[in-house]
Amino acid sequence: MMGRKRSFFLLLSNQSIASAGDIFYLVSIISVVYERTSSVFLVSLIPFINTFSRFLGGLFAPWILEKGSLRSILASASIGKGLLLMILPALLLTNVVSSFLIWALTVVGLIAVFDSWITPARNASLPRIVPRHSLVRANSLMAMSDQTIQLAGWPVGALFIVLFPPGAVLIGTSLAFMVISFLLLGVRIERSDASFQTSSGPSMAAVLQAGWKYVWKHRPLRTMFIVDGITSLTGAIWIAALLYVYVTDVLQENQSWWGYINASFFAGLMIGGMLCFRFEKALQIKARYFLIGSSFCVAVFTFWFAFPASSVFALLISLLIGIPTQVQEVTQISLIQIHTEEKQLARVFSARDVILTSFFGFSSLLVGGIAEVVGVRNVFIMASLLLTISGLMYVRYRNVLSTSAEEQELST
């Protein structure tokens, strides 16, 4: 038991430091690119390349994860990210803008590819580290760690850029990525090596298709993945460009308010993670009802967000949206881990990452144009309707969403 706890907290520490590092290196690159080019377009390329590269990497993640143990892949990806970041400080010394820009965008893309392997590997590792009855608690802690870093990381990263040169921040982040890979040496992931083929085995095409086929054959997974696609489409309502228009047109406030709204949303995510941690037993027993309830809550609050009584009220609604959003995410990840055979976990989570990334990226491209045609308020109304559909899907297939082994067998 102590060995499992130690492994989990080492993995959690690795994730927390890595999440902070991801923010710090992006803040540094954005700062340098804007300072040297004064181009908003070039800065906007950074999140686009990040999303697109993560999608491409996710397509091949099952094959990569098949070639080694989860622990070795997590460590290798972390070291790879650190080595890539070492290139940029040297380029900063040359003062050649074009060279730095090309390399910066290339590094952002390659790091996103590494991240597309890290996320499914991490989610697939948890059921091998913690017992099944502790999965909700473990996923809650992982989620709270992520959201705490997201909430605090951007302002802290901006402060670092003010206090230190961007090159120094990049070097520090690079070293952190390489050092945290050693934390994984103490992580014991049971039976992980037996799940992978290192030499002979299925073809690449068979491996890449296996996760998708497995999801389609199992109704609980198929249902959750369809809902994932729907909710990812609505996730684009939180991108900075749309919130900026919302703050200006609906709230009639200055641009700083979109930062307040984002902070409120992330605070809600943190509270949602705490509630999952506190009520883990209830969530395990009544997982399907938490999914249904949280889906409808997000839909109602999103509709309400389109008609705030005041700017302060919009902050409260943003907080309320974050709470059930996190409850839904933690519950769904836990259910996927329970309903998936151990050897298929990495493939299934790779497929999920592709769905989340591709649908969010597609929606991000469309949402601005839709807002120009129908208005930003109607975009939130449309999102609430899509979220209602996802809740209705959970109602329709509630009988196959269970945490009990007996009902799991029946549902397949």
Image: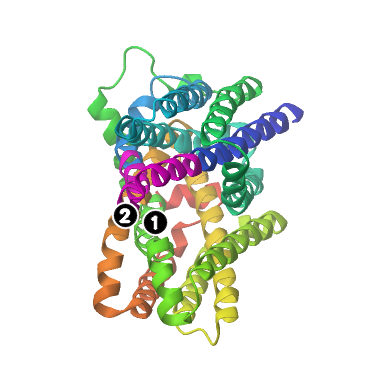
Residue 110: numbered disc? none
Circles 1 and 2, Cβ within 8 Å, touching? The answer is yes
Q: Residue at x 46, y 47 (%)?
A: 409
User: Label 1 to label 2, Cα distance in Å?
Assistant: 9 Å
Q: Is residue 28 magenta?
A: yes
Q: Which picture quadrant has residue 185?
A: top right
In primary-sequence order, the first of circles 1 and 2 is 1
Q: Residue at x 47, y 21 (%)?
A: 83
Q: Residue furthest bottom?
A: 309
The front one of 99 and 298 is: 99
- For label 1, the residue is 228
Q: Is residue 307 above or below residue 209?
A: below
Give the x, y percent position of residue 341: 46, 36
Q: Secondary structure at mark 1?
A: helix
Question: Badge 1: how crowded within 10 Å, few (<14), some, or many (20+)?
Answer: some
The front one of 122 and 130 is: 122
Q: Secondary structure at mark 2?
A: helix
Residue 283 at least partly seen: yes
Q: Main secondary structure of the magenta part?
A: helix
Q: Quadrant of the N terminus?
A: top right
- For label 2, the residue is 359
